[in-house]
Image (cartoon, rainbow, N blue to C red):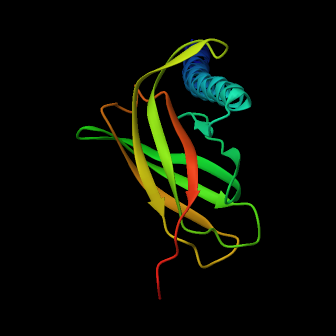
Amino acid sequence: MTKTYLRFLLAGCLISLTACAQQTEVRQMRQEVGALNQDMMKLSDRSVKLTQQNALNAKSTTGVYLLPGSDTPARLNSQIGNLQMSLSNIAAEANGTRATLTIKGESSDPLPAFTAEIAWGQIQGTTDSYQEVNVQTQRIAAPASVLAPSDVSIPLRLSGVTPEQLGFVRFHDIQPGIQPAQ
């Protein structure tokens, strides 16, 4: 009787341990599936933003659009050369949004000093039929760079719109600047 009792006890323990191990594995798999779903949603959102950014830039005759969330530079052929621009460090600020505009020259020459117009706001409608709303603008100035290839990072203060509301930043009207006297 003792052997039978021990066999039942051992079998019960093995079943319990197997069930616990399966529960742990199931819980771990659920966490991994949840993480993969979040990653897929982020990639899907980024893909939509990138598609919209590319479509807006294909139609644009007045500069280049940068859409938060696309995480991809946009190219612009300007008076100061071919440029790649991107937005980063988008965050809330007391009266709006702050971001960093990075501009990279594609040539082996340093970027000259320049001024440009920045517009920002929201986009309503579809990529084919859209309207810019609550648009605000500001003029920015960038100093000449001394290194080549060069890039310049410009901190932006985009008032009146939260990061969640920010639909676009449009960079346009680039004018070569006057070099300061040395």
Q: In percent of the image, x 23 and y 41: which residue is there?
A: 94
Q: In percent of the image, x 60 and y 16: which residue is there?
A: 15
Q: Is residue 38 above or below residue 9?
A: below
Rendering coords of residue 123 (x, y %): 50, 20
Furthest residue toward bottom: 182
| Rendering quarter of residue 91 | top left
Furthest residue toward left: 94
Q: How many marks?
A: 0
Q: Nearer the viewer, residue 101 or 20?
A: 101
Quadrant that contains the N terminus: top right
Position of residue 116 in the picture relative to residue 96 (left or right): right
Q: Is residue 145 above or below residue 73?
A: below
Q: Nearer the viewer, residue 176 or 146?
A: 176
| Rendering quarter of residue 151 | bottom right
Rendering coords of residue 42 (x, y %): 59, 28
Q: Is residue 86 above or below residue 65?
A: below
Rendering coords of residue 167 (x, y %): 48, 27
Q: In percent of the image, x 69 and y 75: which residue is there?
A: 148
Rendering coords of residue 158 (x, y %): 36, 40
Q: In percent of the image, x 34 and y 30: which residue is there?
A: 161
Furthest residue toward right: 107
Q: Is residue 127 above or below residue 120?
A: above
